[in-house]
Amino acid sequence: MDFKPLDINQYPRPDLQVTEDNVYWKNLTFPCAFKEFGGVDFIDFSAELAAVTCSAKVQLYNTAESKLQSTFSRFKRTAYGGVFRHKAATHRCNFTPSGVNIVSFSDDKTAAFWDIPTETKLRSFEGHKDYIRAGAVTSQDFFISGSYDHTVKLWDARTGGTVSTVDHGAPVESVIMFPSGGVFISAGGTSLKVWDPIAGRLLSEIVQHHKTVTSLCFASNGGRLMSASLDRHIKIYNTTTYEVVHTLNYPSPILAVAVANDDQAVGVGMTDGLFSLRHMKKDKSAEEIKKKNTYETDFKPINIDIIVPGKKKKISKKYDTYLRKFDHRKALDAVLKNKIQDESPEITVEVLRELMRRNCIKGAMAGREGESLLPLFKFVTRYIGDVRFQGFLIDIAWILLELYGSKIRHPEIKKMIDYLNDAVNSEVELIKQHIKQEAILKMIKNSNRDENVEEPKLIIG
């Protein structure tokens, strides 16, 4: 009797609609990761180079060859991308369009306008009440600065005064100006806000992250906007509608994101010192695709030929093969591969269900460490908030904690459990918000119902 393959339940997917953006951004290659000695705070692309600011040095990477090219390490303290010295650390600086001036933004609560040839400060701009950690140059005479005092200021470099000030409502981590100069975006807390710089008017607010947004950049020649967050996600927005068109996921909280010209590469810096570099796959020509999917032959059947179809050999899935052999650990490993986790999580869930039905789930999950344990924690953390699998994965999470909770002193295991804890807390907060919204809706509904009830009338006969 043949072994019956595992029957995979088909769940309705929340993201069944495949858009052009989904197809486009999935062309990014698998990331090349480089381990640094401190959090990667800032990234900037130029031609085929990426400058990465981390710890007390600046690393220069060759993006074409995906390797470190040179290192600048003559810093006595942590480097944040500053070129000239303020009274405190300089976290950001930008060139003006002329290329002969630099605007720097500092923790001493000031911005400064510098002349590069003479290396002198031409003007200092005072007005913020806290650290300035974000800035962008809009033209030769105007620039914006974002501060931890929750404000963003538009400055006139000729007069040294402010043109307008807006309140973001949270410490400002990043600001970015559209190339046209008519609109700028500030990021801080969990939100992005779109502003009219002259009128100081809020045009739109975007909340797609559940932790602090740390970095903004444009992609697709200004047609797309990227936001990076400590929640380990990068959201990609349509700059016309500000709707999310794609999401990129990373293993650690993100401090910086940057995109090379024509989206040829995406650089991401993380708090644990990882710098991730992903290239965009080149479009294959129609001829290459044709060669891949077909083969040439000179044989052409004629009417008198009888074509006998070949017998197709049944090919078992790897996890089915291991399940048939009762090799439960390898069956689980087979469905924890990145490709299956990303594209078919329902297969992983169904194999876990089968292992639970066989009463061997703990045996398959136990005795893991490092590379064999990380994919399991990663899968549960990633999908525990998915309504399709939530109830079942809560049970799996309890088993994980039962098996590995006693080893929480181990740094790697502690980190995995912390990530799982963050994911559960985020889901709890989301449920709380839904309950509040439901209560408000019920209150409004009951209020409307009461208004529609006519007061009893006294009728005297």
Image (tube, helix red, strand yellow):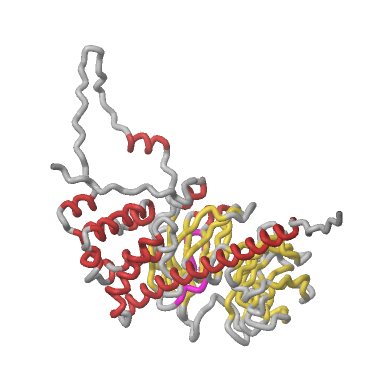
Query: x, y percentage for residue 232?
Result: 46, 67
Query: x, y percentage for residue 347?
Result: 32, 52
- Residue occupying the far front of the picture: 461
Nearest the eye: 172 or 231: 231
Q: Is residue 252 above or below residue 353?
A: below
| 366 left or right of 213 in image | left
Tell me what residue is drawn at x 32 percent, y 64 percent: 375
Nearest the eye: 71 or 405: 405
* Magenta stretch bounds: 39-51
- Residue occupying the far left of the picture: 1
| 83 left or right of 371 in image | right
Dominant SS in magenta? strand
Tell me what residue is drawn at x 65 percent, y 77 percent: 147
Query: x, y percentage for residue 23?
Result: 47, 47
Tell me what residue is drawn at x 56 percent, y 62 percent: 208
**Based on the displayed image, in which of its 4 quarters is residue 195 positioned?**
bottom right
Tell me what residue is drawn at x 51 percent, y 49 percent: 21
Residue 44 in view of the camera: no
Q: Is residue 292 above or below residue 150?
A: above
**Quadrant, the C terminus:** bottom right
How many numbered dots are placed on residues in this image? 0
Residue 158 in view of the camera: yes
Query: x, y percentage for residue 452?
Result: 74, 56
- Residue occupying the far right of the picture: 461
**Quadrant, the N terminus:** top left
Residue 34 sits inside the magenta stretch = no
